Image: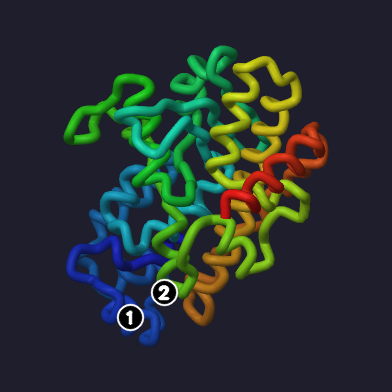
Amino acid sequence: MLRNSLQLIDGIGPEKESDLWDDGVTTWDELAVAQPQHEDFLKQANSRLNDGNARYFQDVLGSRERWRLYADFQRKTAFLDIETTGLSPDNSYVTMVGILDYTGFTAYVRGDNLDELPTALRAYSLFVSYNGASFDMPFLDKEFGRVAPDGKDSLFAHAAHLDLRYPLRRLGFKGGLKKIEQATDLGRPSELSGLTGYDAVRLWKMANDGEPDALPTLIRYNAEDVASLPRLTEMMIDEMSYGTPLSAGTPSPFPEYDTEDLPYDSGLVRHLTRSARFRS
């Protein structure tokens, strides 16, 4: 898909790219012939793509077209979602991080293996989240002491980041992740669908208070959030690329992850759901 993207050239915006496509200039190679002044830059871009440098393309494409990176970096993508004790990294902390990649799902849990996360993140070229730019990434940078104002010391400085909240908003989908899952019919099919971020906080407290099934239930809740991200990404890319040369490079389906393999306590879920009804 990136080799059909002409907007990485300074001075080529959406309208000019569309005009070039209409004129039959749909790839980097064709652009280099039609406009030879860009040949050196396109050679550099091709080299960076062959090197797997997603961060380079994030910088040259800009935030609006960042969704185009996914197809070319799918196998080195990590879908990421965190759970915390609150809404601000200034007065709360990360309890667990769920990562879904081509090999499956891994839970990084505080007090167990959360300290392994920075090393694990180095393996990825692209991170995909929902609202991660405002929530997940700042929490994780604070957790691991990476809070440089310029972002160069961020855990994620080596890679690109696609926050699905923004391209999905361009398609008309607003609100939280669960609302969008329901609107697109791409969400979790289990009884955990009624749980919220507040319930995730309560599950962590229960686990610390000695409830043996609270942590597995929290992990399952997180995994179901993460498992919906590839489906939402693919739907979004299909919609955004429809009718353009970009559609020729749409990615193959991401391996489906079956959260049914993860245990949880149904009684705990019912208790939390009933409590939520009383609160409302």
- Give the percent coordinates (x, y) of residue 277: 65, 53
Q: Secondary structure at mark 1?
A: helix
Q: Quadrant of the C terminus?
A: bottom right
Can you identify the residue that label 1 sits on?
A: 20
Q: Quadrant of residue 69?
A: bottom left
Q: Given the current orientation, which residue lies at the most extreme front position?
A: 278
- Give the percent coordinates (x, y) of residue 19: 32, 84
Q: Are marks 2 and 1 in contact (CB under 8 Å)?
A: yes
Can you identify the residue that label 2 sits on?
A: 26
Q: At 79% from the left edge and 33% from the top edge, which residue is drawn?
A: 265
Q: At 47% from the left edge and 30% from the top edge, which residue is drawn?
A: 85
The type of residue carrying mark 1 is Leu
- Give the percent coordinates (x, y) of residue 217: 71, 33
Determine if residue 101 is in view.
Answer: no
Nearer to the camera, 165 or 193:
193
Q: In the image, 255: left or right of 141?
A: right
- Total labels: the figure holds 2
Q: Secondary structure at mark 2?
A: loop
Q: Which mark is residue 87?
A: none
Q: At 52% from the left edge and 40% from the top edge, which residue is drawn?
A: 81
Q: At 56% from the left edge and 48% from the top edge, which residue is drawn?
A: 74
Q: Quadrant of residue 187?
A: bottom right
Determine if residue 28 is in view.
Answer: yes
- Measured in 3D between alpha carbons, the distance from the residue under mark 2 to the one under mark 1, in whole angstroms, is 7 Å
- Give the percent coordinates (x, y) of residue 82: 51, 36
